[in-house]
Amino acid sequence: MAKNEIRQAYNKICAEAKSAGKWFVSLYAIESYYGGPEEGGWWGNDCVLVEYQEVRTEEEADLLAEKITQLAAQMTEDAKRQHGERCLRESEWCAARGLDDDFLPEVDGHDEYRVVIEETPGSQEHRGSRHYE
């Protein structure tokens, strides 16, 4: 019996059967960078795979992604707060020395985190352009 025929026979008996497969629940970091001074300054970002978990059902992937999405949102808020605190410390350092903020290099921005359900881990990775376009 062919694999397709087996599935059809199984589905006649088990009306709610689900196909086995592989899904990956992936956590990505969106890392921003300062690109250069052209046109008043420009920024870009890289999308980097941090971790992933393989699961066998789409339902399991959805449940896991929901939990990790909450964690990713908290990680993004923490990164935003830490970035702001760093900028404040650097500004205070300049002020204590009578320097303008221009003394420091341009800031790159805070990291963000997102969760993706995908069939291939790392499929969302990309590296931003390092050249002004």
Image (spheres, helix red, strand yellow):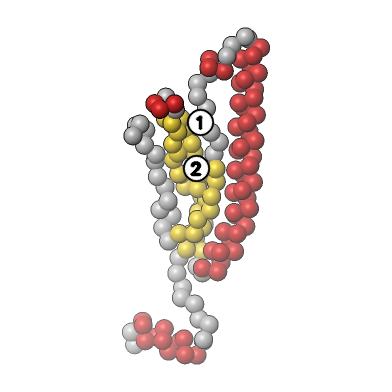
Residue at 61%, 48% in the rendered image: 73
Q: Quadrant of residue 85?
A: top right
Quarter containing the C terminus: top left
Q: Quadrant of residue 100?
A: top right
Q: Position of residue 60 (x, y in %)?
A: 56, 66
Image height of 96 relative to 51, above or below: above
Q: Is residue 123 visible?
A: yes
Name the mark on residue 69: none
Q: Position of residue 44 (x, y in %)?
A: 44, 36
Residue at 55%, 43% in the rendered image: 112
Disc on the earlier residue, 2 or 1:
2
Residue at 53%, 82% in the rendered image: 16
Q: Of residues 101 and 14, which is closer to you in this image?
A: 101
Left or right: 2 in relation to 93: left
Q: Of residues 99 and 117, which is closer to you in this image?
A: 99
What amino acid is found at the position of numbered circle 2 in the picture?
Ile
Q: Disc 2 marks which residue?
A: 30
Left or right: 92 in relation to 108: right
Image height of 61 relative to 86, above or below: below
Q: Which residue occupies the extreme top position in the image?
A: 98
Q: Disc 1 marks which residue?
A: 108
